[in-house]
């Protein structure tokens, strides 16, 4: 195990610049590369709204899930392996998410975002909660993954198994404030040896798209769960279920149910 850990080079994502920068005292301190597809909206909800949301979640039952997590699902029952789904029992997203979804639409990146599923996850250090590196499904779920981080800050760890290397630039002094003077790439690192840490503040909203959605796996390590953390993840439909897609009628039905906001956890 030690040998694997030594080969992991940690980079920190800076949301104000969109670059990942080598961690302090690492082999790549001061080196950086662009990391597209991550949007972080801080203070998306207030502490009062956060408290109200978690209180409403806790009134409903939580189901024990993998790796010490508990979850509540608001969405269709899906068999991803067989690519089949059932709408029976799905009554929509919870009523308290109506305002959250309305607010999402105020941001350009989410103005046409119509979630068809909400999954609440409850992380707790006493249960050793974590989630292994994974990519979300693309048969049913669309381009944007949206997560609201509640109760405590954490770190989303992103890694990629692709062959090849990432080209690095020497970050100018004063980084991340000054990016104008970035030099030509003059160093590289193997993709498989890089882990990008995306800090998620309390009450922030994260949007993953493009490469961050489809090429980089995301995880939450046990060591980054220091207090109770609740995360609400919202997913939209893939092109197959949208107008013009092969299953557009089913997609329309799912959206009508979802956006009625009358749901109970499945």
Image (cartoon, grey):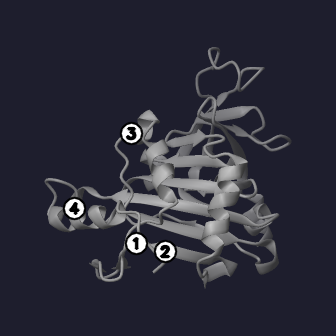
Of helix, strand and loop, which one carries label 2?
Answer: strand
Distance from the alpha carbon under mark 3 to that under mark 4: 18 Å
Q: Is residue 212 left or right of residue 184?
A: left
Q: Earlier in the sequence, mark 3 or mark 4?
A: 3
**Residue 42 appears at what percent x and percent y?**
65, 40
Q: Is residue 236 left or right of residue 186?
A: left
Q: Give the residue drawn at x 31%, y 67%.
A: 257
CB within 8 Å, label 3 to label 2: no
Residue ID for mark 1: 75
**Residue 253 appears at what percent x and percent y?**
23, 67
Q: Quadrant of residue 232?
A: bottom right
Residue ID for mark 2: 73
Residue ID for mark 3: 111
CB within 8 Å, label 4 to label 2: no
Of helix, strand and loop, which one carries label 4?
Answer: helix
Residue ID for mark 4: 252
Of helix, strand and loop, which one carries label 3?
Answer: loop
Q: Earlier in the sequence, mark 4 or mark 1?
A: 1
Q: Earlier in the sequence, mark 4 or mark 2?
A: 2
């Amino acid at each position: 195990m030690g040998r694997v850990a030594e080969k992991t080079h940690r980079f920190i994502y800076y949301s104000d610049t969109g670059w990942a920068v080598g961690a302090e005292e690492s082999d790549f301190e001061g080196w950086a590369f662009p990391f597209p597809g991550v949007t972080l909206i801080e203070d998306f909800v207030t502490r009062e709204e956060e408290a109200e949301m978690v209180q409403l979640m806790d009134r409903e039952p939580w189901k024990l899930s993998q790796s010490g997590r508990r979850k509540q699902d608001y969405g269709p029952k899906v068999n991803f392996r067989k690519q089949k789904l059932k709408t029976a029992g799905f009554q929509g997203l919870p009523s308290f998410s109506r305002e959250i979804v309305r607010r999402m639409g105020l941001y350009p990146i989410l103005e046409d975002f119509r979630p068809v599923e909400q999954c609440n996850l409850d992380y707790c250090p006493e249960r050793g909660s974590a989630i292994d590196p994974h990519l979300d499904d693309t048969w049913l779920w669309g381009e944007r993954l949206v997560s609201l981080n509640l109760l405590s800050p954490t770190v989303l760890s992103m890694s990629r198994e692709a062959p090849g290397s990432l080209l690095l630039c020497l970050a100018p002094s004063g980084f991340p404030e000054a990016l104008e003077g970035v030099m030509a790439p003059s160093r590289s690192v193997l993709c498989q040896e890089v882990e990008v840490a995306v800090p998620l503040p309390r009450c922030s909203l994260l949007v993953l798209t493009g490469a961050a959605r489809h090429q980089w796996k995301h995880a939450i390590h046990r060591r980054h769960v220091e207090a109770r953390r609740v995360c609400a993840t919202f997913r939209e439909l893939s092109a197959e279920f949208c107008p013009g897609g092969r299953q557009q009628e089913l997609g329309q039905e799912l959206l009508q149910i979802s956006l009625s906001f009358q749901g109970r956890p499945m």
